Amino acid sequence: MSIPTQQHIINGEFVPPSSGQYIDLIDPVSGQVAGKAAAGNAADVDAAVAAAAEAFKTWKNTPTSERAGIIARMALVLGANLEELLTLEAACTGLGVTRLKGFDIPAVMQFIQIFAEGLESYPFVEYPPVRLAPEAHDVRVVKQPLGVCGLITAWNGPLFLAFLKMLPAIAAGNTVVIKPAETASLAVVRAMELMQDLLPPGVVNVVTGYGQDVGAALSSHPGVAKISFTGSGRTGTMIQKAAAETMKRVTLELGGKGPGIVLPDAPIELTARGATFGFLLGSGQICISGTRLFVHESIHDELVARMVELVGNLKAGSQFAPETTLGPMAYREHYERVLGYVESGKAEGATLACGGGPLQVDEYSDAMFVQPTIFTDVTPDMKIYNEEIFGPVLSVIKYSDVEDAIALANDSCYGLSAGVWTGDPIGAQAVAQRLEAGTVWVNDWHAITGDMSFGGHKQSGYGREINIASLEGYLETKNYMTSFETDPNAKAFFGLVHQVV
């Protein structure tokens, strides 16, 4: 079977990298090359931004109904090519096709529906009431697209994130340059290739490559009006600094260290299944994972024992096998970093309830699986408590006073996700309201819907994504004021400078 070699997509055309170089995309289960992506650089970014800027001249004036129709047809295109896209996404990310079919793709389809249905009723123009003081004016508030937007996505859900960012950007009338993660671009490039049949050339461009080359060039480019980035806090800080030079708008969705508080009345089975799901979906390689679990002392031992049982039933294997429930780490450097955190937990005195090292799978000797790992007796001075691990590692902290649990949960530089496990979901609202996070679940985790926006507090980033309100981040507000008074002597403020004649 031949592997795909993908080029950039610029102005509706396939464009080879000006460097002539390509990046090997490695299947993290088999260890084999799954495809090749163009290794872009600043020259490629310049070409893509120029194409997007030219396309913006006409796309920004496209009727809203036409943009909504184009977005609606995207669902049909994705559906017709679903198996190919699933295969490409799974091959270079290790994400299970079961997850992709059950989570990522349905979410993308919902995003498309939200923007296709909500775009025409969105208030791009508002007419406040006429005020008689200081004099009668007609005021019109117009929201206009920004221009060229750079969209930089992470490797833990490339297709999901690309549509999450692209849809509101083009719905608002902007044009885009997408930079997928260098390790995981196969499905994104193919999907955006398919979109070219729906869109005018230059509206959606894709430049693949390393962050220090393509991402940095986009973030500092004077022709880019906005950057939307999902990824690490360290890279987010660099992007924010680079964008400041040209006053770009920035949306950042960064790391997390999601705390879950298990109240004394929490049902054991619901909590055990939910909390393991919270830290093991995507093998923990999700920013909103629940990785700190504060458990009341009265049910601590029973809950941990049941979670260890559940974890023992997981099956590691091929991302294409429906029975696989545990995937690998996405690439070698990350795999080694996660194992380093596990070793630090042992060295700093945490108690290992299960897991604690690499997971060997006979059929895939080169695969980068990590044993699902649960630590107890974790304290706030440990690395595994404070730092985002981005792997299948959970820190359990025993508490006796819920006030202490809330204080510890909030004592973090992150504020992306949090949750409460309880037998009284109504009463638990009082706890949920005090947790400092952009999304707080009660008796659930990882649930998202297009009816709510998504984003973080503190060092988890800023700006909102997912729902129709995310259009705000891709629009500029302009005020038009028309005066009905034509007699200069009657103008309310002219007398502050001119004498009345």
Image (cartoon, grey):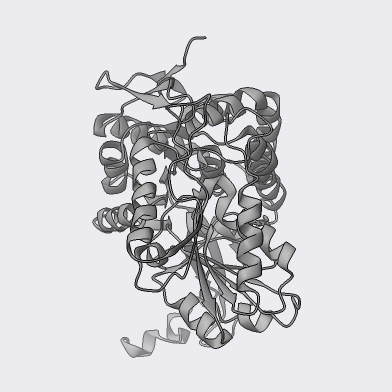
Pick whichever, 400 or 439, lies toward us. Answer: 400
Rendered location of residue 161, percent (x, y):
52, 44
Q: Quadrant of residue 243?
A: bottom left
Q: Can residue 451 be seen in this snapshot?
A: no
Give the side of residue 306 with respect to residue 436, left or right: right
Residue shown at 37%/66% (left/top)? 349
How many labels sit on residues? 0
The quadrant of the rendering that contains the C terminus is bottom left
Pick whichever, 72 or 297, lies toward us. Answer: 297
Q: Can residue 124 be seen in this snapshot?
A: yes
Q: Quadrant of residue 365?
A: top left
Q: Residue furthest top?
A: 1
Q: Quadrant of residue 182?
A: top left
Rendered location of residue 57, percent (x, y):
45, 39
Pick whichever, 390 or 397, lies toward us. Answer: 397
Residue shown at 36%/36% (left/top)? 332
Give the side of residue 310 with respect to residue 40, left or right: right
Give the side of residue 220 with respect to residue 429, left or right: left
Rendered location of residue 64, percent (x, y):
63, 46
Q: Is residue 485 above or below residue 104?
A: below
Rendered location of residue 138, percent (x, y):
57, 72
Q: Is residue 170 above or below residue 189?
A: below
Q: Is residue 358 above or below residue 11?
A: below
Residue shown at 52%/27% (left/top)? 362
Pick whichever, 262 or 299, lies toward us. Answer: 299
